[in-house]
Image (cartoon, rainbow, N blue to C red):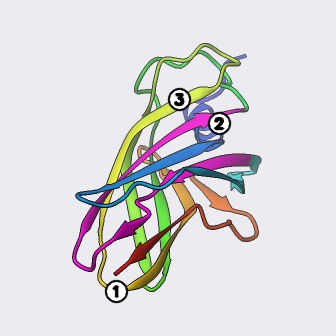
Amino acid sequence: MQMPKLGRRTALLAAAATMTTGLFAAAGAAPAMADTVTVNYDCVGYPSDIAVTIDAPATAGVGDTATFEVSSVVTTGAPQDLPAGEVVTDMAIVVGGAQSGTITASGLTNEATPAGQPVNMVGGEAQITFTSAGSVTFTPSTTTQVDNGAQCTVVGEAPVGATTVVS
């Protein structure tokens, strides 16, 4: 039995949100070691634990701009064979500490994936300009499927994925 397209895509979103990795790069900023945090998501009724890795610059200066790239690996596996580009998502990253707001990493797309295998989502990107001195934190938040708006929301409180010290 084949799922209806919306149901199949919602299931794909649930799968696509299972493990997310973020990478930050700022011109002249010192890179930091990447840490992995586990975040519990509810993807339209499908609970998913997502291991999130954010690699932010360890330090940056006020006024520096950092590029925020996001990729993900869905650990629960694809519910069916996925051709490359079948699923496109955005992910919100909450900025806290010395600065506040939300960054949206747009354009994450899946690589070709056989059914039952982890799904690699690549190509998401956003930017942040550091406006305040102090520790700036980055915390994974809502993931949204672009074509139908289906969302995966954080259950409880997500741990901080990275911190940049801005001077």
Q: Is residue 71 magenta?
A: yes
The answer to the question of whether label 3 and label 1 lie on touching residues, with beta carbons closer than 8 A, is no
Residue bearing mark 3: 120
Q: Tell me the residue at 60%/13% (across/down).
A: 114
Front in this rendered view, residue 94 or 57: 57
Give the mark nearer the N terminus: 3 vs 2: 2
Kindly report the distance in space between the C-alpha atoms of the residues bearing marks 3 and 2: 10 Å
Q: In the image, residue 76 lies at what x, y percent?
A: 73, 32
Secondary structure mostly seen in magenta is: strand
Q: Is residue 148 magenta?
A: no
Q: Tell me the residue at 64%/61% (across/down).
A: 153
Quarter holding the C terminus is: bottom left
The answer to the question of whether label 3 and label 2 lie on touching residues, with beta carbons closer than 8 A, is no
Front in this rendered view, residue 20 or 130: 130
Q: In the image, residue 62 lies at what x, y percent?
A: 27, 80
Label 3 sits on a secondary structure element that is strand
Front in this rendered view, residue 44 or 91: 91
Q: What is the span of residues highlighted in magenta in the rendered image?
A: 49-75
Residue bearing mark 2: 15
Q: Amino acid at mark 3?
A: Asn
Residue bearing mark 1: 132
